[in-house]
Image (cartoon, rainbow, N blue to C red):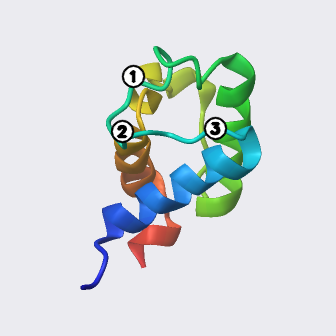
Amino acid sequence: MVATENEVLHAQLRTFFSKNLSVEVSSVDADLVQAGILDSLAFVELLAYIEKEFGTEISLDGIEFEDFRSVAKIAEYVDAHSPVLKV
């Protein structure tokens, strides 16, 4: 079975949380803020990772925090904004 692009993104993002923040995300739909996983420091690390890994330039002025509440939402954001994935 071939993984979909979203499944690959989900796996990459879950790996980021595991390796960089030492946290296992239970589900791609889990609320990262409510679970205490995504605080302000982790959010900054996540944004830096997304910019570097996916070639995305994130403007803090236009950012909607709701787009980063779960791994699934983050994957949607990356998919919509990454020039690397548009190839």
Q: Earlier in the sequence, mark 3 or mark 1?
A: 3
Please state the horizontal and vertical placement of residue 43, each as a whole percent of the image. Answer: 65, 28
The quarter of the picture where the C terminus appears is bottom left
Of badges 2 and 3, nearer the viewer stands 3
Image position of 41 (left or right of 54): right
For disc 3, the marked residue is: 23
Q: Earlier in the sequence, mark 2 or mark 3?
A: 3
Q: Residue at x 50, y 18 (%)?
A: 33
For disc 2, the marked residue is: 73
The residue under label 3 is which amino acid type? Val
Few, some or many C-alpha atoms within 10 Å of disc 2 (few <14, some 14-19, many ≥20)?
A: some
In front here: 39 or 62? 39
Please state the horizontal and vertical placement of residue 7, each as a whole percent of the image. Answer: 34, 64
Q: Which mark is residue 46?
A: none
The residue under label 2 is which amino acid type? Lys
Per the image, label 3 sits on a secondary structure element best described as loop
Q: Residue furthest bottom?
A: 1
> Does the residue at mark 2 contact the one at mark 1 (Cβ under 8 Å)?
yes
Q: Residue at x 34, y 69 (%)?
A: 5
Per the image, label 1 sits on a secondary structure element best described as helix
For disc 1, the marked residue is: 66
> Does the residue at mark 3 contact the one at mark 1 (Cβ under 8 Å)?
no
